[in-house]
Amino acid sequence: MLHKTLERLRPAPAGALALAALVVGLTFICTQRALAAVLVPNISTLNITVANGATSAFMAFNALPNNPTLITLTDRTPNDGIVGIASFAVTWISTTVPQIVVWTGTASGALVGGQTNAPGTKLATFGIGVEADTALSGVNLRGFQISNTGGSSAAINITQIW
């Protein structure tokens, strides 16, 4: 009887222990990545008002260099008669001097896109006289501004997903 009990308490083979350690390690890595996906923000939303004839403050692309940012812009101005919507994917490339911004998307139902290293390049026109343009931060081309020539103040919703 004692002999049978001792046989059951025999240590596990080394291969089984290695497999168990691998499973625990992979579980830890998956848990760590899941927490990062939940806890690290990857979206920002901003509501601004841009007066007629004015340009908004500089807004940086939130993604790291060489990673795309999806930007959606909505002109929510009441009584405009039109809801202006634009969306485009932007990547600012920091490995070049001067830096380059590359974008593709839609604005007011039309396809937009291109690449530039110059500030003031139109990324999209949306609404009535409202457009998004590339902008400099110091000497770095890594953001945009909203300009308004539509005749009245424009209420803009800006969402960035990276």
Image: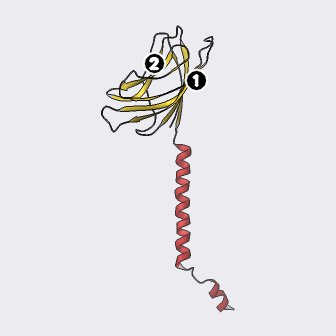
Crowding near the residue tagged with mark 2, few <14, some 14–19, many ≥20 C-alpha atoms within 10 Å? some
Q: From the image, tell me which residue sits under label 2.
A: 56
- The picture places residue 79, in percent across and down from the top left corner, at 63, 10
State the SS at label 1: loop
Residue depicted at x 53% and y 67%: 22
Rendered location of residue 128, percent (x, y): 55, 13
- Does label 2 or label 1 sit earlier along the sequence? 2
Report how far apart the C-alphas of labels 2 and 1 lie in the structure: 24 Å
Viewer-side residue, 26 vs 93: 93
Q: Residue at x 44, y 16 (%)?
A: 55
Pick the quarter of the image with the N terminus.
Answer: bottom right
> Could you say whether the residue bearing mark 2 is in a helix, strand or loop?
loop
- Picture quarter containing residue 56? top left
User: Residue shown at 52%/38% (left/top)?
Assistant: 42
- Of residue 145 and residue 47, the one placed in the foreground of this image is 145
Q: Residue furthest left?
A: 97
Whether residue 62 is situated above or below residue 30 in the rendered picture: above
Residue type (three-letter) at the residue carrying disc 1: Gly
| x and y percentages locating residue 27 in the rendered image | 56, 60
Residue located 52% across and 10% down the image = 150
Quarter-wise, where is residue 39 in the image? top right
**Residue count near mark 1 (Cα–Cα under 10 Å), binned few <14, some 14–19, many ≥20:** few
Asked if one can make out residue 158 in the rendered structure from this viewpoint, the answer is no
Residue to which mark 1 is pinned: 109
Mark 2 against mark 1, which lies toward the viewer?
1
Report if residue 107 is visible in the image: yes
What is the image's colouring? secondary structure
Q: Amino acid at mark 2?
A: Ser
**In the image, 152: left or right of 92?**
right
**Above or below, 6 relative to 100:** below
